Amino acid sequence: MERTKVIDALRSTDFGSQINVKGWVRTHRSSKAVDFIALNDGSTIKNIQIVVDPTKFDAEMLKQITTGACISAVGTLVESQGAGQTSEIQCESLEVYGLCGSDYPMQKKGQSFEYMRQYAHLRLRTNTFGAVMRIRHNMAMAIHTYFHEHGYFYFNTPLITASDCEGAGQMFQVTTKNLYNLKKTDDGKIDYSDDFFGKQTSLTVSGQLEGELGATALGAIYTFGPTFRAENSNTPRHLAEFWMVEPEVAFLDLAGLMDLEEDFIKYCIRWALTNCKDDIEFLNKMIDKSLIARLEGVLNSEFVRLPYTEGIRILQEAIQNGKKFEFPCEWGDDLASEHERYLVEEHFKKPVIMTNYPKAIKAFYMKIDAEESGFGGKSGQTVQGTDVLFPQIGEIIGGSVREESYDKLMNEIEERNIPMKDMTWYLDTRKYGSCPHAGFGLGFERLILFVTGMQNIRDVIPFPRTPKSAEF
Ligand code: 4AD
Ligand code: MG
């Protein structure tokens, strides 16, 4: 008999028909007259109830069907008497695929997320992680659908690279060299000429630079893949391996970029509310009671567009009125998450797109504001970078208009001592038919954090990589 998924069995009204479901036991309650087995197969947050007449089955076998066991059940689909369910199964035969011992780590309800992280291979079978992983899948579908519908091409950029896009020096090296016997050059440096690629290479921190090559040929592209950062940030918002979505668009200016950021992220949130209703309602009930309100709040608000200089003025004013921050926020400082959250959660009470940052705290490729733009505390010192700041999350998107002038870009590269040897291919975009263009990077896991209401980024990716932790 063909197996029916639990999600379809629960939707079916074909009462009286024979049906076969397979899955993992969530709970098994027995009494003299009847046994109830709640079965889940991962297709939905909901369980299907299997009603068992214990007189018709071997008592020993029934006793062994405990939480976590994997079974197959055949029976008649009937209308459920219980509240909140549509259908259940009147069981006729049971087959046990795999028993589950009483030492099953996911047996108890209400275990802490820290505890469950040690069992990332089994936590996937819990309600919360099932919900998070289904939402994660749905967000990936939303991203591909949004860009496909808007005429962007999915563009695959390399994971192994010789250039540091963000210039922050936080890269993981890739090498096949024998680390026990490193060949050095005469001046004591490591000789990479005999390494696999013949030069020093690393895992990419961003697909942007290659993305720009795609955008200046195809018009509009997006990347969606893993990125790697060896920053020693042990925070609930940082992973060493995370997924990033990076659209890059020719002929897009700063206003257009901000429109795109806002439209795209709202589309994803709307998708989640429409397509992940059961999972989001579950998370709203069990994890964060203000989740749905917060998602709807973002959908219904117009994002604030705030030049950095104005943001600093607001923060300074708050300090004068008695607000205390741990870190300084003078013009020129990189904002700390406490400052971003003050602006978003207390001052404006809606998402903020901060723009026109001092160039010294942003990457080399950002377009320098014209002298007369008036955005800077000091003119010509700000760049057309944007950070989208979200409640609870802080920075969810970082993007910018790109500097399209060859001379200005070269100037920055020289001022920052960026090794030019491996950058000629990038500069060629500015040399041959340079065009104004812009793009951004969305941290996929930060989006999942926001949409699920989960508190720790380690709990929205199946197998997190963080400092001192690369299990599974
Ligand atoms: O602001 P970032 O560093 O920007 C870039 O990498 C640009 N090249 C993007 C572009 O313009 N194409 O990173 C982009 C986003 C951040 O806003 C954040 O959401 C996420 O990536 N992010 C991280 N997420 C998890 N763990 C980390 N360690 C992250 N670092 C950045
Ligand atoms: Mg950033």
Image: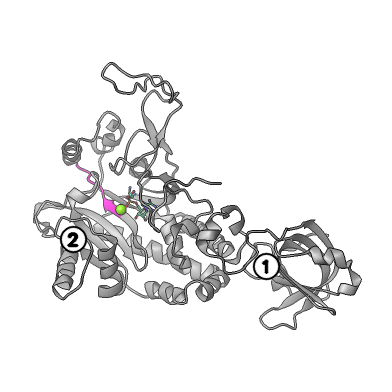
| Helix, strand or loop status at disc 1 | helix
Measured as percent of width and height from the top left, residue 169 is found at 30, 40
User: In this rendering, would 77 be left or right of 263?
Assistant: right
Q: Examine the rendered structure and indicate whether residue 287 appears above or below residue 3.
A: below
Residue at the location (83% across, 69% down)?
Answer: 75
Measured as percent of width and height from the top left, residue 215 is found at 35, 45
The residue carrying mark 1 is 7
Residue 145 visible in the displayed image: no
| The residue stretch that appears in magenta | 399-405
The residue carrying mark 2 is 328
| Helix, strand or loop status at disc 2 | loop
Q: Which of these two is toward me, 13 or 177? A: 177
Q: Which of these two is toward me, 171 or 272? A: 171
Residue at the location (31% across, 61% down)?
Answer: 388
Estimate how packed mark 2 is, as few (under 14), some (14 to 19) or many (20 or more) residues with alpha carbons within 10 Å.
some
Which one is closest to the eye, mark 1 or mark 2? 2
